[in-house]
Amino acid sequence: MSSGSDVILERMMALHPKVIDLTLDRMWRLLDALGNPQDRLPPVIHIAGTNGKGSTQAMIRAGLEASGAKVHAYTSPHLARFHERIRLAGTLISEEALTETLDRCYAANDGADITYFEITTCAALLAFAETPADYTLLEVGLGGRLDATNVMTPKVSIITPVDLDHQQFLGDTLPEIAGEKAGIIKRGVPCIVGPQKDSAMDVIEQTAARTGAPIIAYGQHFHVTEERGRLVYQDETGLLDLPRPALPGPHQIQNAGAVLAALRHLGADEAACEAAMTQATWPARMERLTTGALVRRAADAELWLDGGHNPAAAHAIAATLAHLPDRPTHLICGMLNTKDVAGFMKPLSGLATSLTACSIPGETNTLPAETTANAARDAGIEGTTANSVTQAIDAIIVQEPRARILICGSLYFAGHVIRENR
């Protein structure tokens, strides 16, 4: 049975403009009708970048909450339920509060064209403005400059590594994409910058210089390395020797650097920095599934889940797999037709024994399973198809009962798997 929020979200889909033109005009119109909640938010930490936004947000939240702060958090897309996108003062928004907030936004919009992401972002900002908290963590949805979240002045901005993704909206080259991400930089507001390729960093530095925003950059103002299984962070105020991040994968060391730079900038102590490393959780990012229907079906096989969907994410997955104990690795993959499937396969080619492709159930933009399987074969991975994740798991464990099975390719596919694993 549909909940009240499901019904309103369905209605909001119908307001979608026929053509997406990236602009903030619709946001400003609706925010004005709602009394401009973006001007009444607790201090904002605004996070853009191609990969690592969610992990970075999760670690910052863990650190701030460990210091006793109440933290709002906005992220997208959701995996199993829309409510995951809006965390009010540490708790996922309730069905009652979500329904009431969406209703108010729908009424204030008065039938005008607006995208689903824009109107639901307005709902999040409204809920954040009306609930007391110490901080607001806002994750950019797409790009930065014209993203629906880019409607306030933050206390600090963060740009995680920039890579090629969403070229149909953001541009075909790294400098073009970096320019869109750098659009979150505000006059005089410090911006923490994770590791970047030179062409992206040049654009970010030019934007910061133009807006008088101080840059706190990886490799210049802070350094982070892994030494003897620990994380060592250094900036001008000193050195931190911390546990490795709880979130798996060598790329999380670099994400942790930006997190610690942000926490230090906000005045957090060493205990908060340690909690950011040890207490963060972030579903479907190289997550080992340990309970649920699919885990029971996999029996002696390991089951992992990752929602990364672009070449940079595939490199991170490959690096994580390379650090795990040796075990035959079989992929189950579902992708959207807007993604670079060949680029995603390439980094995984030497690590995967096989790939079973699935179409993403209920997703109109799914890449057909056969297309995904063909891309795997082109990359040198043995590729087959299955009608469902359960069918894929069954086929793999017949062949390799103690396999490592990684389900990957899309956050939408990951959300389907999470619902199926309940």
Image (cartoon, helix red, strand yellow):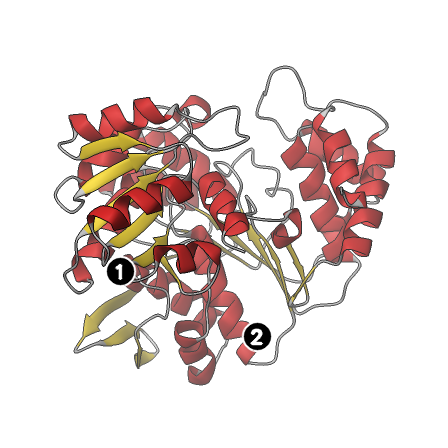
Q: Mark 1 points at which residue?
A: 220
Instruction: From this view, report whether residue 98 is shown above or below residue 117.
Output: below
Q: Report the residue at 32% width, 41% height from top.
A: 332
Q: Can residue 201 be seen in this view?
A: no
Residue located 52% across and 36% down the image: 145
In-image side of 374 versus 414 (left or right): left
Q: Quadrant of residue 214?
A: bottom left
| Residue at position x 29%, y 36% in the image | 356
Q: In which quarter of the image is the N terminus?
A: top right
10 Å crowding of disc 2: few (<14), some (14-19), many (20+): many
Residue at mark 2:
65
Q: Position of residue 177 (x, y in %)?
A: 38, 32
* Dot 2 amino acid type: Glu
Q: What residue type is labelled 1?
A: Gln
Q: Which of marks 1 and 2 is nearer the N terminus?
A: 2
Q: Distance between the residues labelled 1 and 2?
A: 28 Å
* Residue positioned most to the front: 398
Can you say whether 420 is above or below 231 in the image? above
Residue 119 seen in this snapshot: yes
